[in-house]
Image (spheres, helix red, strand yellow):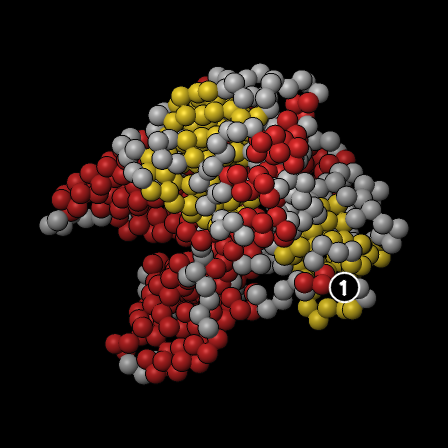
Amino acid sequence: MVLGQIGFLLGAFSSLWWTYLPPVWLTIILTILALGCLFSRKLLLFAGFLFAVLWYTLAGYQRLGWQLPATLVSTDILVSAEVISLMPVGEQAPLNAQLLSINGDRLATPIKVRLSNYDTDILMQQGQRWQWVVRLKPIHGLANEGGFRYQQWMFSEGIRARGYIRVHQDNRLLDDHITLRQRLLNSLEIAQLPSFRWIAALTLGYRGALEQADWQMLQRSGLAHLVAISGLHLGFVGVMSYAVLAWLFSLLGKQTINAHRLAWFISPLFVALYSALAGFSLPTLRALIAYCLIVLMMASRRYRTPAAAFLTVVVILLLVSPLSIYTASFWLSFSAVSALLLIHWRWPFNNSPLMQFVGLQVLLTLLMLPVVGWQFGILSPLSIGFNLLAIPIVMLLLVPGLLCAVLIWLVLPATGITMFSMLDAVITLLIKGLSALDTLFAEGAIRLTLPWQSWLYLLAMTLLVIIPTFRWRSGLIGLCFISMVLHGLSSFFDTRQHWQLTVLDSGQGMAVVLMRNKHAILYDVGASYSDEFDIADSVLLPFLRHHGVRQIDYLFISHMDNDHAGALPALLASEFKVPQIITSQNGCDSSLSLKWQGLHLRGLWPPTPASSLQSGENRYSCVLMLQDSAYRILLTGDIDKVAERYLADSGVDLRANVLVAPHHGSKTSSTQAFVEAISPQHVIFSSGFLNRWQHPHAQVMLRYAGNDARIHRTDLHGQISVYVEEGDIQVRRFRESGFPYWYANSQ
């Protein structure tokens, strides 16, 4: 049985590296082979592996079974839908909804979509049913090194399409019913509690009210897990409810009932209550199932060791929710429980409860450092102290208190709000204390950019230090340490004489990074869409940190349109110092000539500095030629055919190996004379997925293809990186070479 479970886990884990789903006909062969292997105990490991491959193949095809029809893409459609996201009072925010019908045709199964609301006259609440006019696209996310895998997240959450609600006279409310969770959120928000955002996170799993400064403090202190309701919270609720129930039942007399057994069977109800308050999110649903399974196994006494029980629980969880394996929350939970089991096996604590808690927290933090560092690129050694302070207060006081406040609110709303107010005072004091400590030890968090191999060696070394001594342990620890150091040093001291230009996948905009020897030059920084989202914070800065860039030497802004310069304030507010910003007004013109890291940068356009009025126009975009002794790359901003004609007729040698196409591939640019003058081997289009301007235009792409240029598109291929080294030039597409896995690119 154990061998079969291990085989299943290995098969499930193998799906993380699939670049495409196995063909359907293979499922028949897999079924026959898996069934055949069941008849031999020696082949149980193989049987489990085959069954997992079969299960994940079927789950993948089931997930991809409904695709947004091409006829419905980016066109007005009339839908009826139910709001399933918690919505703040009086505010517009992106929401998830279940589509019930499309253009009057009722769907056999509701389809989950993610929508933005452009109709400011309507305010939605969770549970309401609406009729909207919407425009939808297949799920798609920006694909860059170091960036958040938004498309993978939507895939794992079961979201089938994304889009927006249009302003339209047919938008109307069909059913005004709102959920209990929404009513509670509304009551808390109306009460105007100072710590409302923290209460909403700990009670309802609603983190939309948390501010950017809150997240930064949580990340530096290692406390982000406390505001994400998960197995830790539900486990505490289960154990505490068991303890209270067992005590209450014991008062009735041991002769009539088995207090402990009855308490174990009832405690899952309280865990389910908390999970329901959190909206049965994937982490809470996973924790609820795990808790119920553990209670059943303890009651039936069918497991021999905690490790065997954990293995069974993980297999069942992956059978019930196979796509959860593609989420970060699964791996953090899996790693944390594995670490707890390892600690329990290696150091079974027999001292006081306080010392057990301290020892457990210290060891768990140390074991999780490599996992957290690999996942988030930040190490917080001081998180041990922060967690020792915060966990007892949150788990032993706030979580039980908030749940009691909810139960009181259900019967006596005013009294319930009063109790929330009392807990609000405690939370306010806790946050003030944590913020003060965070300010005092702000430098304690270390941002590290290491190859994934270094994190793997660090994890292996940590495990080797912990496990009992064996013959080759010291040698293996030394080997892991040397390998980790060498990989780490290679990321800081790259002796290869190469340079790299990357056109980031920044949607309908532009952000380009030129890198050499951990120094960088930026050409445009992308758009800012709101106070909560801009390309600098979501794409550009994570990319620079991922590559360990230590210095930005120059920043060129082609022109001041939002899609090229909107994220500039966010960049300037980051840890990177920008010594010089060059625009077509103050230096980026035909007189520019710079030597940088062995490369030559020349300005080609405009012919003279632009005026403040002209600097915002596409035509006067800063045009740069980057070159070494053998290769040339041309950056053109959003210039139009007038500027192209001037350049083509100027007599300047425009030939380039790589061209970043003008104006995202618009019909107003890329004239035949300009294309022939450059004669690029590769042309890169920076454009948004299914954008309304239809960039890059089909005629423009045909024009380049007719001149034997290979076409690369950020909307289809993700970030495009050009590597120039020792007389060789390579162009790599992130979706094909960097992250080609089926679950990350499925629509």
Percent across and percent down for residue 519 are 39, 26
Residue at 44% x, 51% y: name it. Answer: 739
Picture quadrant of residue 559: top right
Q: From this viewpoint, which residue is outermost toward the right?
A: 169
Above/below status of 141 relative to 369: below
Q: From this viewpoint, which residue is outermost toward the left?
A: 471
Percent across and percent down for residue 683 are 51, 44
Residue at 78% x, 69% y: name it. Answer: 105
Say which residue label 1 marks.
102
Q: Taking the image as drawn, is residue 504 in sight? A: no
Residue type for callout 1: Ile
Above/below status of 608 relative to 42: above
Q: Secondary structure at mark 1?
A: strand
Say left or right for 457 vs 525: left
Percent across and percent down for residue 25 are 46, 78
Above/below status of 92 relative to 585: below
Mark 1 residue crowding within 10 angstroms, few (<14) / some (14–19) / many (20+): some
Residue at 62% x, 34% y: name it. Answer: 645
Say left or right for 498 vs 614: left
Which sits in the foreground, 193 or 712?
712
Above/below status of 155 relative to 467: below
Percent across and percent down for residue 18 are 42, 61
